[in-house]
Amino acid sequence: MVFEGTYSTYQIYGSGKNISALEASSNCGREKLACIMYGVPSTLSSNDMASLVKDLRNVAGSVFVTRLSVDYYAGFSPGWAEFVSEMAA
């Protein structure tokens, strides 16, 4: 697990760059890395969500993204279908 936290934490700390650097400096490929992001703002556009999922898929083999901020393991956010579509793309 290379990242588990909120969307804002990911943005504030430049986590994408840090994960890429970790992958590049280690002997493990992206398929061995996982990322969980919750609290993605509902104001994030579909294009921005697609870009976010694409960026995460480039650095981690397993990705979970949700707009929920609480109980995000207990249910699916309203954007679940959108996330699944982006993962399949």
Image (spheres, grey):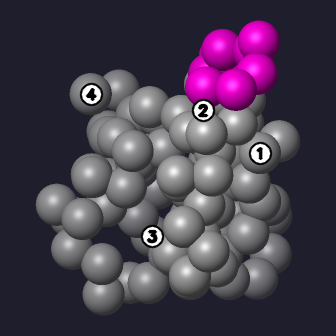
Please give the label number shown on residue 60. Answer: 2
Q: Nearer the viewer, residue 18 or 32?
A: 18
At x 74%, y 54%, the residue is: 3
Report which residue position mark 4 lands on: 89
Task: Confirm whether residue 28 shows in the render.
Answer: yes
Spatial distance from mark 4 to mark 1, Cα to Cα?
A: 23 Å
The first of marks 4 and 3 along the sequence is 3
Q: Residue 45 vs residue 38: left or right?
A: left
Q: Position of residue 4 (x, y in %)?
A: 77, 59
In the image, which disc is placed on residue 78?
3
Amino acid type of disc 4? Ala
Judge depth for marks 1 and 3 and give the one in front. Answer: 1
Q: CA distance from mark 1 to mark 3?
A: 25 Å
Instruction: Name which residue type carries label 3.
Output: Pro
Instruction: Give the residues in magenta.
Output: 24-32
Q: Residue at x 60, y 32 (%)?
A: 60
Quadrant where the N terminus sits is top right
The residue located at (52%, 52%) in the rendering is 17
Question: In terms of sequence position, does the residue under pointer 2 or pointer 4 come before the other?
Answer: 2
Q: Do the residues bearing badges 2 and 1 touch, measured as CB atoms within 8 Å?
A: yes
